Amino acid sequence: MERSGTERTGQIDGTLPRAFFAREVVTVARDLVGTTLLVDGVGGLIVETEAYDRGDPASHSFAGPTPRNTAMFGPPGHAYVYRSYGIHWCLNFVSGLQPGGAVLIRALEPVAGLPSMAARRRTEIPRLFCAGPGRLTEALGVTRAHDGLPLDAPPFRILPRYGEPDIAAGPRIGISRAADLPWRFGLAGSPFLSRPFR
DNA sequence: CCGCTGATAATCT
DNA sequence: GATTATCAGCGGA
């Protein structure tokens, strides 16, 4: 059984406040590593993130608001979910001091709801449950239905981390523009990353 | 270990 | 018609 929010954080309700997301996207992306993401009680430790913001050629918000990226231009602390390569869903946390910023959640270390993840992912290998943005959404049951939902209310729960994790940084994965920016963050040495840092 | 390929759909040129 | 914030399966070294 998981420890209570009070025991972990000293707060009554351990869920991250919306103000957490209303900071520089790169800072939010780094600070999310080591927090715990649950969707309907299924999830685990966030071990890999990427930052995107307005003015970033690799960001969906770069060209301005469209039907797809509407949530990115709404208030921080909400989900932005989009379909990737026609097959996968990808989960972002709308963040930043200006509209158009978001943090892509790329990998989790599975902690809660392991049987549900195994069933949804059709594999018994925990390392492959959430190692990648598309795998993660499949394991947690995240779809377009979650686009725009607030992150401080069910089905979402995001719990603060305890101490300071050892965080690695590097270039983002799978993009062609602004590919040199070190806006990918991860828990150093974690076996649950989508790809290792070097 | 590495690289290639197909699946599949919204968005943009 | 091309591109894309991906993944799984395959073949070769």
Image (cartoon, coloured by chain):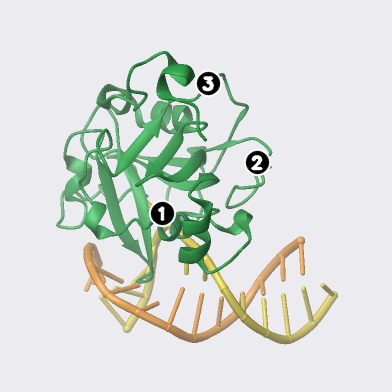
Chain colours: A green, B orange, C yellow
Q: Secondary structure at mark 2?
A: loop
Q: Quadrant of residue C9?
A: bottom right
Q: Point out residue A14 in the picture as x, y percentages from the top left corner.
A: 37, 24
Q: Point out residue A40 in the picture as x, y percentages from the top left corner.
A: 34, 47
Q: Please give the count of numbered marks on the rendered protein.
A: 3
* Number of the label disc, if any, that sits on residue A162: 3
Residue extending farthest top = A10
Q: Which residue is mark 2?
A: A190
Left or right relative to A183: residue A164? right
Q: Amino acid at mark 1?
A: Leu
| Labels 1 and 2 touching (C-beta < 8 A) | no
Residue A57 seen: no
* Number of the label disc, if any, that sits on residue A140: 1
Point 23% across, 44% down: residue:
A72
Point 40% across, 42% down: residue:
A38
Asked if marks 3 and 1 fall on the same chain, the answer is yes
Which chain does the numbered disc 3 sit on? A
Left or right relative to C10: residue A32? left
